[in-house]
Amino acid sequence: MGIVKIDEDLHEEVRRASAVMCRSINAQAEFWMKIGKLAEANPTLSFNDIVRMQLESADVRIADLAA
């Protein structure tokens, strides 16, 4: 595990978002980095498409989430 230096304002945004999303600060930052990496690799996909793709790759049935 390494250390990543980020701008203090961005760190504050990560902290606030982590509280809303019930994630640790590190987990929130990791989520944003993963989604950003996937968005760069798949520029035609929306955020929802990327999340759906990740859920499907983890064998999470989307229909179960809608219930």
Image (cartoon, rainbow, N blue to C red):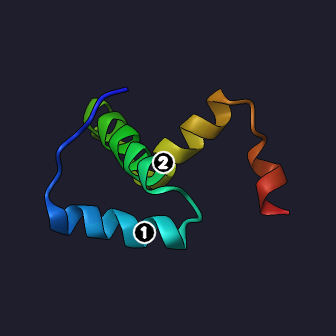
In this rendering, position of residue 3 left or right of residue 16: left
Q: Residue at x 68, y 30 (%)?
A: 58
Q: Secondary structure at mark 2?
A: helix
Q: What residue is pinned by disc 2? A: 27
Mark closer to the chain start, 1 or 2:
1
Depth check: give the residue in front, 63 or 4.
4
Q: Amino acid at mark 2?
A: Ala
In this rendering, position of residue 35 left or right of residue 4: right
Q: Residue at x 31, y 43 (%)?
A: 36
The C terminus is located in which quarter?
Answer: bottom right
Quick check: 8 above or below 36? Answer: below
Q: Are marks 1 and 2 in contact (CB under 8 Å)?
A: no
The N terminus is located in which quarter?
Answer: top left
Crowdedness near tag 2: few (<14), some (14–19) or many (≥20) residues, C-alpha within 10 Å? some
Image spot of residue 5 (x, y percent):
17, 45
Q: Amino acid at mark 1?
A: Ala
In this rendering, position of residue 63 left or right of residue 45: right
Q: How many angstroms separate mark 1 from mark 2 (CA)?
A: 11 Å
Q: What residue is pinned by disc 1? A: 17
Image spot of residue 27 (x, y percent):
48, 48
Quick check: 38 above or below 31? Answer: above
Q: In the rendered image, which quarter is residue 12 located in?
A: bottom left
Q: Secondary structure at mark 1?
A: helix
In this rendering, position of residue 55 left or right of residue 44: right
Crowdedness near tag 1: few (<14), some (14–19) or many (≥20) residues, C-alpha within 10 Å? some
Q: Residue at x 23, y 39 (%)?
A: 4
Query: What number is the disc on residue 56?
Result: none
Image spot of residue 37 (x, y percent):
31, 35
